[in-house]
Image (spheres, helix red, strand yellow):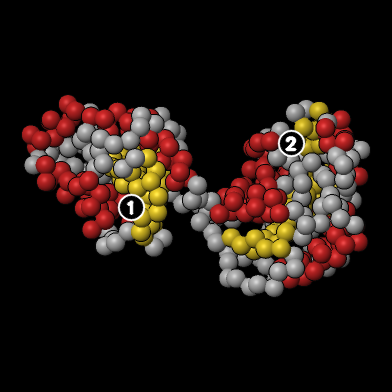
Amino acid sequence: MKVSVIADDFTGANDIGIQLKKYGLKVITKTYDSKISIKSDVEIISTESRNIDKKKAYERVKKSFMELKNSEKFFKKIDSTLRGNIKEELKAIQENINKQEKILVIVGFPNTNRKIINGKHYIKDIPLHLTEFKNDPYFPIKTNDLLEYFEGEIIKINDIRSNRQEKLKEKIKSIKSQIIIFDTENNNDLDIIAKTIIELKLDKYIVGSSGIMEYLMKYWGYKRPQIAIISGSCNAKNIEQIKVLESNNNIEVIDVDFTKKNIDIEKKKYKNDILIRSIKNIRDYNKAKENYKVVEITDIFTDISKKIIEENNIKNLIISGGEISINILKKMSIDYLEVIKEIEPGIAYLKYKEYNIITKPGGFGSEKFYKKAYEFMKSFR
């Protein structure tokens, strides 16, 4: 599915671009006058039209929109504080689509304290036109009423939070205006809006801040690339270091229990990032050696790790333990790695084709190494 975006400034283009990149997509940002053509999953055009003459803004957006019009999904990124030539830029889109097609306006961005309640814009519960943005040198904000910016009808919070999704769908379908404006107070509202408009197939033309994008991607079926942390070192320092990830709700822990003579790991698709661990503590390690030779522990653990990685198509790996690292890579037929940078002394970030890999000797790394490495890997999605 081809997704295209027009943003009115370069930082806004890159803001939404980095969100889309988190899903493993190839994202290209270019200027409105660029002649370059690069194959990508997402194309973003920055029109640099926020602070220019209204007529020029209209022309730039029209030109860019005609270039992207055939995309399956189109998103017009606007400033979450309603600065810029919003009316003119929306007009450039409206005039070039079928009058029966809806344009949905979803401005709210709860993560940055931007809320829309009864069609009015608030920042930290203060009306937009009473915040610092009233003194903007280019576009001093004079009202927080979205109907002053968009000629449409409002879907209010009470409609969005109806106990029955069908009721919300009926409300949306009953609106005659081409433009539908949505209230948004929290992220759950965004989730409901995205799910509903996609089910109604009204998600082709969306205007808004980047707050809604995460939820559109969710219901469009995109998943963020997973991360696997493979802790195979029996070093006491490593065993303590890895505990920092145990309480992370976004990580599923898979303990390979070598204290048992029969090891059975459930075959499943994991929704979250995963931690595959061979040893929970030194006591378990000593018990494991009663059941298996060290070479057997290595072989079984790397077989299990490889299987989980491949079944879940995971490309971002953090591996601890020298023997574990080389054995996993060999079993995955990875016969070379490009050295990119040092994460911490003696700990490398490496690349192999589409794989991002960090390898760590067991006793190396700071107390918070795994947290640091995990955050680093998250930057690739």
Residue at numbered disc 1 = 309
The amino acid on which the numbered mark 1 sits, given as a three-letter code, is Ile
Residue 268 visible in the current orientation: no
Q: CA distance from mark 2 to mark 1?
A: 39 Å
Residue at numbered disc 2 = 114
Image position of 221 with respect to 32: above or below: above
Q: Residue at x 82, y 64 (%)?
A: 60
Q: Position of residue 277 (x, y in %)?
A: 27, 39
Q: Nearer the viewer, residue 100 or 253?
A: 253
Residue at disc 1, secondary structure: helix
Image position of 100 with respect to 176: above or below: below
Residue 60, disc: none
- Tell which residue pokes out farthest to the front in this image: 345
Q: Nearer the viewer, residue 169 or 14?
A: 14
Q: Quadrant of residue 71?
A: bottom right
Q: Nearer the viewer, residue 172 or 221?
A: 221
Number of marks in the rendered image: 2
Q: Quadrant of residue 289?
A: top left
Q: Residue at x 58, y 66 (%)?
A: 40
Q: Position of residue 50 (x, y in %)?
A: 82, 52
Q: Position of residue 171 (x, y in %)?
A: 78, 46
Earlier along the polypeptide chain: callout 2 or callout 1? 2
Residue 28 visible in the current orientation: yes
- The crowd level at tag 1 (other Cα within 10 Å; few <14, some 14-19, many 20+) is many
Image position of 51 with respect to 43: above or below: above
Q: Quadrant of residue 310?
A: bottom left
302 with respect to 253 (left or right):
left
The amino acid on which the numbered mark 2 sits, given as a three-letter code, is Arg
Q: Nearer the viewer, residue 224 or 346?
A: 346
119 with respect to 23 (left or right):
right
Q: Residue at x 53, y 53 (%)?
A: 23
